[in-house]
Image: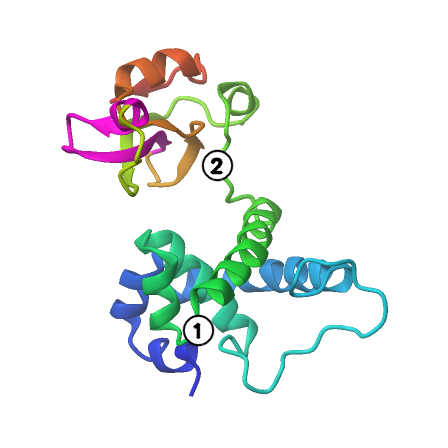
Amino acid sequence: MSNYARLSRKRKRFHALTGSTLEEFHALLPAFRTSFLKHMELYTLEGKERRKRRYVDYCNSPLPMIEDKLMFILMYLRKATTQDIFGEVYRMPQPVANKWIHILHPCLNQALAAVGEKPARSAQDLRSTPEKGQLFFQDGTERPIQRPKNQEIQATFYSDKKKRHCIKNNVLVNQQAKIILLTPTCEGKKHDKKIADETGLVLPDGSSLC
């Protein structure tokens, strides 16, 4: 039984692991399938240009169905764990996990863009959105990283707030709990307020920020 077939029977656990409800997952799945198949028409699993044989899932693939592939990349991004640990969960060595992550992550971004769910990455893109007169929420997010060996770099990525080395982004969320802006990733020591100032955010007319 595939991981998707097993976990999709447990709705709460599925939501906790992927960050998506089953309904949201299946709404995204067709666009993700299209993006993945388009990629595999052009490239092999090793990233080389495809010349002859078309892509088919091999019989002992750790990700046998397109549902498994989407769940795999959603879980990886949701949990932000190391590739070694994640590979162990899916019973694949770290290099294989790395290969799949690099294939599936761009496919996920393309699928999110296709269904209108990909956050803007700059304030300029956000200004073109039609939402007006809404309430918005802004906060900083931090993702832990392995402590750099270089001491100067350590200081750059160390967050006094969380007492750990990390990278961070600010997110802007609308009143429907949808992330509409994700700022560029920056070093952990940078304050949320400074990130917000550098973003140059201008909200739509009649809107307010909490």
Amino acid carrying label 2: it is Pro
Q: Disc 2 vs disc 1: which is toward the camera? A: 1
Does the magenta portion include 156? yes
Q: Which residue is mark 1?
A: 92
Does the magenta portion include 130? no
Magenta residues (range): 152-174
Q: Quadrant of the N terminus?
A: bottom left
Residue 161, given in percent of the width and then of the height, sits at 15, 27
Residue 172, given in percent of the width and then of the height, sits at 36, 29
| Nearer to me, 75 or 49 | 49
What's the mark number on residue 119? 2
Q: Is residue 53 left or right of residue 139?
A: right
Residue 48, given in percent of the width and then of the height, sits at 73, 59
Mark 2 surroundings: few (<14), some (14-19) or many (≥20) residues within 10 A: many
What's the mark number on residue 205? none
| Nearer to me, 17 or 201 | 17
Residue 25, given in percent of the width and then of the height, sits at 45, 63
| Nearer to me, 92 or 123 | 92
Q: Quadrant of the C terminus?
A: top left
Residue ID at (31%, 18%): 208
